[in-house]
């Protein structure tokens, strides 16, 4: 089964010192999505080559995650997920077709997709996907404002999950976008499988006790499960 919490790397992440990965693992978060947007990176580091940095960072992070037993997926650059020590990829709405990604990566890799509405979800061939990242829950500073879709809130998740249930769709849904600790009970009780978070952990400097609170609240408020089944 997929871990219920996915940590998405922050735009200001320190990739020189990966001790934050140890603290995530110690606190109970066992999934990291490497997300380094090229425009953010080049604005902050105009003197560095983006592709070289991403490749070297992925190599180092993959070795670290393998040692700790942490799942590692990549955002956007799905071709990197073909590597043995990378577990899969997340595909944005403007990225490659899901069929292309699945064909390239094969059946054993995790593939997730972004959705902003129930219409998005219903338009996908869900047999190709292992999970949906649905959001935003609320405003988030880790995405470009001009690309941010309207907030769903708990009511939006309730509506989406009810429609999915009525259509016998059990693809795991992860809530994402501006989620804070106090939001978890009402979000999880909508029936989502898990949550994807970034700033709320990064901004607290990966405090282990703080991470454990997130993990405990998620587990305590699970309403229903949508297990990741083996692909045939």
Image: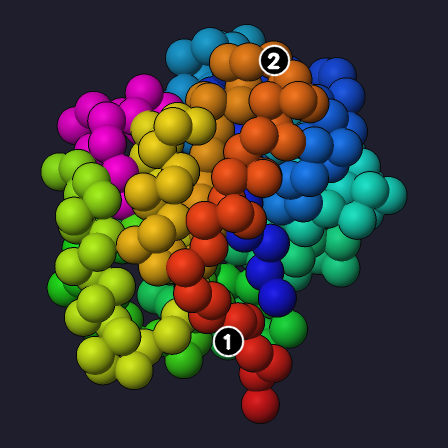
SS for dot 1? helix
| Image quarter hosting the C terminus | bottom right
Which range is magenta? Answer: 135-149
In depth, the one of 19 and 179 nearer the eye is 179
| Residue at the right extreme of this rendering | 67
| Residue 97, image quadrant | bottom left
* Residue behind mark 1: 103
Task: Please say whether residue 141 is one of the residues in the magenta stretch.
Answer: yes
Above/below status of 222 relative to 42:
below
Above/below status of 210 relative to 97:
above
* Residue behind mark 2: 205
The local crowd at label 2, few if under 14, some if 14 to 19, many if 20 or more residues have their Cα within 10 Å, is: few
| Residue at the bottom extreme of this rendering | 232
Image label count: 2
SS for dot 2? loop
Residue 105: x percent and y percent?
A: 58, 68
Q: Residue at x 53, y 23 (%)?
A: 201
């Amino acid at each position: 089964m997929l871990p219920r919490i996915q940590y998405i790397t922050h735009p200001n992440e320190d990739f020189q010192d990966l001790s934050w990965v140890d603290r995530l693992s110690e606190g109970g978060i066992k999934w990291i999505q490497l997300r380094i947007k090229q425009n953010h990176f080049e604005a902050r580091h105009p003197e560095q080559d983006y592709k070289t940095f991403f490749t070297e960072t992925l190599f180092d992070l993959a070795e670290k995650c393998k040692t700790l037993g942490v799942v590692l997926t990549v955002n956007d650059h799905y071709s990197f997920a073909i590597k043995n020590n990378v577990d899969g990829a997340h595909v944005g709405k403007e990225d490659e077709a899901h069929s292309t990604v699945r064909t390239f990566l094969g059946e054993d890799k995790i593939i997730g997709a972004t959705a902003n509405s129930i219409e998005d979800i219903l338009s996908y061939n869900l047999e190709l996907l292992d999970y949906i990242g649905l959001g935003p829950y609320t405003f988030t500073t880790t995405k470009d404002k001009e690309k941010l879709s309207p907030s769903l809130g708990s009511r939006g998740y309730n509506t989406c999950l009810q429609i999915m249930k009525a259509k016998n769709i059990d693809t795991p849904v992860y809530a994402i976008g501006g989620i804070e600790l106090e939001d978890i009970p009402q979000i999880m009780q909508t029936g989502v499988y898990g949550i994807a978070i970034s700033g709320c952990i990064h901004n607290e400097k990966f405090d282990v006790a703080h991470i454990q609170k997130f993990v405990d609240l998620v587990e305590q408020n699970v309403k229903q499960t949508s297990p990741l089944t083996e692909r045939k």
